[in-house]
Image (cartoon, rainbow, N blue to C red):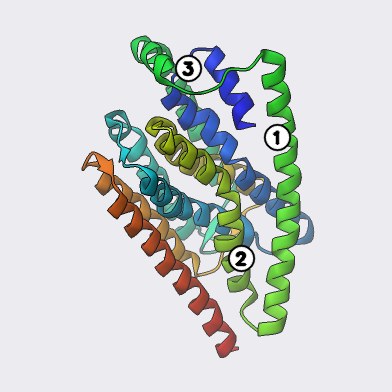
Amino acid sequence: MVAGASSIAKKFKIAPLIIGLTVVAFGTSLPELAVSVSDSINALIKGGNAEIALGNVVGSNICNILIVLGVCALFTPIIINKKLLKFEFPFLLIVSALFLVFAFTSPFNPYTILRWEGAIFIVLIIAYVTYLVMRAKKDKNAVELSRKEDTIKEYSTPRSIIYTVIGLVAVFVGGEATVYGAKNIAIGIGTTSGADPNLVSSLVGLTVVAVGTSLPELITSAIASKKGQNDIALGNVIGSNIFNILFIIGISSVICPLIGGQQLFVDLFVMIGAAILLFFFAFTGKINRMTGILFIALYGGYLSYLIVRTVQSAQVV
């Protein structure tokens, strides 16, 4: 899907940075979209909370920064494009903070994203993509320069469309299978351990599902980083995190209000903390190998916390 969509975008002479922030970011976020929307529909039809949907997005955003960029930095230092510091980085922090505000200020139930809040997210993602397209058209010199340096393979139009369509179908089928499997894992663990069902679902969403749906970002960014395509690697992660919040949470919450547990308080602050940490290192001009190791170590610490939190809930019960 990413190969086909990137080829189509290149035919329209769109710069690799914009492709990374939009086409590749959206394409690699499709697993999160499929999983979260499927979980939201299940919650609407069968009742209950969409813990997988919320945990998937929050966990994926944490994983994208700490694991994806951490692993990429092990291959080669990631040079920060200064254009990202002017708009994309601040915008990611703003939408992350808005996500947190919406989650903690619901008048009916704490830790809830309501339909009208989801609608605001959808409006913002439309505005964001529109801005990027307009910026790409204005920056013609950058487009020509980046076209000479990029390594995105351009296929024929029919082949690009076939790749994109087949990829889309496969992703959504995989999303349905992932939700089915994740729900059964959560039920199985909860039944045998006696742990809090909400915490178990949250753990599965934040780890198994989040890491699984972040694999496209990891593979795409790692390959791009290894080839020296920092714009694609970094733009993919930042764009994916923006898409995850605005588009995926937006669509999912419009279908059915997303209700999380009190554990969401810590998870959202970890997500924003990871974004702030990335923003801090971005001002140094690059993310080197030591920073990559730090990111991976921090994710390991967070993963340990999630496991301990869930185990302790079983002991309480």
What's under tag 2, amino acid-wise? Answer: Val
Mark 3 = which residue? 14
- What is the crowding at mark 1: few (fewer than 14 residues within 10 Å), some, or many (at least 20)? some
Percent position of residue 218, x then y: 51, 46
**Counting residues from the N terminus, which is met first, the one under dot 3 or under dot 1?**
3
**Residue at mark 2 to residue at mark 3: CA–CA distance:** 38 Å
**Residue at mark 3 to residue at mark 1: CA–CA distance:** 21 Å
Q: Is residue 7 visible?
A: yes
**Counting residues from the N terminus, which is met first, the one under dot 2 or under dot 1?**
1
What's under tag 3, amino acid-wise? Answer: Ile
Relative to 245, 201 lies left or right:
right
Q: Secondary structure at mark 3?
A: loop
In the depicted view, which residue is nearer to us: 137 or 150?
Answer: 150
Q: Is residue 43 visible?
A: no
142 shown above or below 120: above
In the depicted view, which residue is nearer to us: 211 or 314?
Answer: 211
Percent position of residue 131, x then y: 43, 23
- What is the crowding at mark 3: few (fewer than 14 residues within 10 Å), some, or many (at least 20)? many
Whether pointer 2 and pointer 3 mark residues with C-beta atoms closer than 8 Å, the reply is no
Q: Secondary structure at mark 2?
A: helix
Q: Secondary structure at mark 1?
A: helix
Q: Residue at x 71, y 55 (%)?
A: 178
Mark 2 = which residue? 204
Q: Quadrant of residue 26?
A: top right
Q: Which mark is residue 168?
A: 1
Percent position of residue 8, x then y: 60, 18
